[in-house]
Image (tube, rainbow, N blue to C red):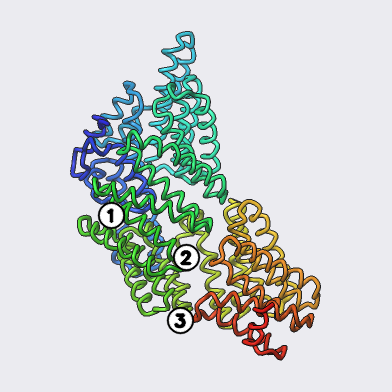
Amino acid sequence: MKNSTFLQDIFSRGNTHILVTEEVQLAARIRVMADDIRSGRNTHLELDAFYDGFDIYQDLQDRKQQLQQAIAPLEATAANYAVLAGQIQQVVQEENNMRANILDLALTLDKVRGSEKIRQIRQAYSGGQLRQAADILTDEYLTAQFREYLENEQQQQKVSEQLVDNANEFLVKAEITNLNYQQTDRFERATSYFEKGKRSAKASRNQGFLTQYLLKFGYFLQTHHQNDAAYTEYEAALSYLQQLEQVDLPDYLHYQALLSNNLALLHANRHEFQQSAQRYKEALRIRRSLAETAPDTYLPEVAWTLNSFGELYRNWGHYPKAKPLYEEALQIRRVLAGKSPDLHLPAVGETLNNLGNIYKLQQDFPRAQQLYEEALQIYTQLNESQPDDYLGDISMVLNNLALIAAGKHDFDEARTLYERAIEIYQSLAQKNPYVYLPEQARTLNNLAILHADSGDHESARAGYEAALKTYQQLAELHPSTYTPYLPILLNNLANLHGRQNELPEARGLLEKAIAVYEQLMRRDDHAYQPYLAATLTNLANIQYEDDQMEAALAGYERALKIYRALAEANPQVYEAHIGLLLNNLGNTISEKGDLEKAEQYYTESLKVYQELADLHPQQYLPDVAMAAVNLSIFYQESLLKREVSLHFATKTLRILAAFAAGSDAFDQLRQSALEVIEAWGEDPETLLQEWDKR
């Protein structure tokens, strides 16, 4: 597939380091870079000379330099230091967005039909004159053209083409407007131009073009986190697409796959996992078919969909289903990297890291470590040729290797790895705080968890508080993005206070976290229900420990109601939470003396865990053992049913026999079961032999 002359011209000027070849389609490469920049994976510093040629980008650079000069002589404690730091962070965010949006505009200008105005804008873009480009398409011109075309409706074919041009001009006007960061209402103005262009696209009666336009509009809304509005545009595009035959729209299957893929992402963001999985399956089926005839173009998209589908299953808790998807994506990306390492080797590192995450979650630490180390080797190699561009990825893998070391109780190694990652993030955050301060805070949180697990409570508290302070500062500037991190840190701090038996402090922090989640749920009820339920459970646990049984009971019941509703759509994800809450309710009701109801809760908890263990024994049998030992204690201490109590104590020991000793939690369950058996005057070894004969 030949590369367009327009894209070749603009990306061959300056020192962009983009190889213009027939083998790798230039448009596809630019899309990858725009996605990298927008996601924060890679800012592509090799494009700096390209961006420096644009007037509005230079304006932004000048503003950043002025702020950096103003903050340089100040101490961090100075009165206006935080204000200037926040302004720098805002400019850096705008800079990243602008870098991605300039690439998006190039792809749009390359694709749209060339009216006289579009040709003028291409010329202005090629010269870096985006301010001039904004003046070419005035509101008066665009509106007058739309009205004129409708008045000449008798010349239907010509008018249809003119309306398509008019819609494209509105589209380009929207994208140029979105680049003007000096306008506080740029998003609203850009959306208005998109809407007006949609009116022209519908009036054109060209359903193929309208489908593409709605897809573009939906993607714009999605990148600005307007998920509900994006969903509406995608659904409309899909409806029009389904009315078309393949001959009516070039690349019909490509657009069908793209729509399915983008809808899958939206469903995943709304925790609608089954709908998301169905959309990914559609996208994957189509892209596999397209890759058979055009592998250079579509194999990267197959790998991208496999990786995203794997992420869905990982977030859903379906680790066995995620693993083969990541493995196939890795296999494809290794082949692609062999042909074009500059373009595809970073994706190999990403997939190795993702696959390592699955093995880590399945407690296969040696295999996870092997994958992380290969990813680290790749990112280190890439960083040698592009200094600083892959330091963020290196820190991410160091963080994951630290989690592996912590999982193996090698706390010294884990601490060293975390500290290396934090040092890199601190260095990166000085240049690009918007991208790397959140990562620095996340790693500080992980190090604090390590300190807490190793008994260093003071260091843990300092780490949690430092991470919380960073997220609070970020949330003041960007509340929709960073407010959700605040209750996570509040939960962790509360857990630390709970470990130290500082129950009032823990309760206060959890109440704050609940208030934040309730506020967030007014904006997105679906996304935060699981987190609210988990925090309600944590608060009820503290209240139980503090003998506030009525409050604990109310919290458990509210959390259980939320989890039952969530489990109707996603039982595999939420049934385990229901099992734990039923067990906790059994404990609470038993303390209140309602033994009949407590027995019901304990029994249902065991049933839930047993059903999960029938499907995933390695994952859930320990929970069955926990529920069984609690029943054995309940029947021993409360209902005084000897045979039933011994039955569940023996069941616990039989289950735990399949798991290696050394886990504190497992050892505690074993000890509890042995104590029940001995309390009934039985010898555990003799009893187990007798039960084997029954």
Q: CA distance from mark 1 to mark 2?
A: 47 Å
* Residue in the picture at 30% in, 38% down: 296
Nearer-N-terminus badge (1/2):
1
Answer above or below: position of 577 versus 640: above
The residue at which mark 2 appears reads as 362
Answer above or below: position of 664 versus 30: below
Residue 158 place in picture, x, y as percent: 41, 13
Which numbered mark, 1 or 3, is in the foreground of this view?
3
User: Label 1: how many residues lie within 10 Å, few (<14), some (14-19) or many (20+)?
Assistant: few
Nearer-N-terminus badge (3/2):
2
Q: Amino acid at mark 2?
A: Gln
* Residue in the picture at 41% in, 53% down: 326
Camera-side residue: 630 or 467?
Answer: 630
Nearer-N-terminus badge (1/3):
1
Q: Amino acid at mark 3?
A: Ser
Residue 533 place in picture, x, y as percent: 63, 62
Task: Give the quadrant of the N terminus.
Answer: top left
Q: Which mark is residue 454?
A: 3
Answer above or below: position of 525 versus 452: above
Q: Which mark is residue 65?
A: 1
- Local secondary structure at mark 2: loop
Q: Amino acid at mark 1?
A: Gln
Q: Which mark is residue 311?
A: none
Q: CA distance from mark 1 to mark 3?
A: 44 Å
